[in-house]
Amino acid sequence: MKILILHGPNLNLLGTREPEIYGAMTLDDINNKMIELGKELGAEIKCLQSNHEGALIDALQDARTWADGVVFNPGGYTHTSVALRDAISAIVIPVIEVHLSNVYAREEFRHTSLVSAVCKGKVTGFGWRSYDLGLRGLVDIIKV
Ligand code: DQA
């Protein structure tokens, strides 16, 4: 089983970016944890981050050719991007939306997600554990 862990804009700054909201872990810390968890669950993990909407769309389209599913934190594009939503619904493989923070406990503009309706599931508010829970759920869904 092969899984893409995809991170959107500004998530490369984790560790120093508003740690009171996003936690102290760096993106590398999270990626390493996901690679280790993947070994435990029998999944090969590839991690990718981009600050660019088009690069994220390319990564999703490419995942269709090699991955069984995607754990995706679209960052700020969650709330704005019709194009990412269209890419998710086009690729058919399951995508799990994850957020470090609880978006519903924050500003109102974060309460709207353009991608949720085309994702298989969503995890929000557990810090880095949102990725952990998302990956576990995704692997389980693929196995059934
Ligand atoms: C985020 C939440 C988004 O609203 C925000 O724009 C991010 C990070 C999260 O992981 O909590 O960049 O996706």
Image (cartoon, rainbow, N blue to C red):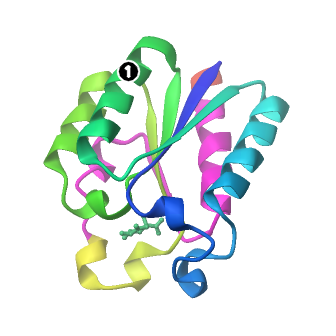
**Displayed quadrant of residue 89:** top left
In the image, is 69 to the left or to the right of 9? right
> Which residue shows up at 39% across the image and 77% down it?
104
Residue shown at the point (65%, 30%) measured from the top left: 45
Q: Is residue 59 magenta?
A: no
Classify residue 54 as left or right of residue 7.
left
- From the Cβ of disc 1, is ligand 1 less than 8 Å away? no
Question: Does the rendering let one see residue 99?
Answer: no
Disc 1 marks which residue?
Answer: 62
Kind of element beneath mark 1: helix
In the displayed structure, 99 sits above or below 52; it is below
Q: Is residue 118 above or below residue 7?
A: above
Res. 73 visible in picture? yes
Q: x and y percent of residue 54 in the render? A: 24, 39
The location of residue 69, given as percent across then percent down, is 50, 28
List x then y, in percent, for residue 90: 24, 25
Image quarter where the C terminus lies is top right
Amino acid at pointer 1? Asp
Image quadrant of ligand 1 equals bottom left
Residue interval drawn in magenta: 112-141
Residue 77 % position (x, y): 27, 58
Pointer 1: residues within 10 angstroms few (<14), some, or many (20+)?
few
Q: Determine whether, in the image, residue 105 is placed left or right of residue 112.
A: right
Direction right: furthest residue: 40
Q: Work out which residue is located at the far left of the displayed protein and give it.
A: 82
In the image, is 124 to the left or to the right of 103? right
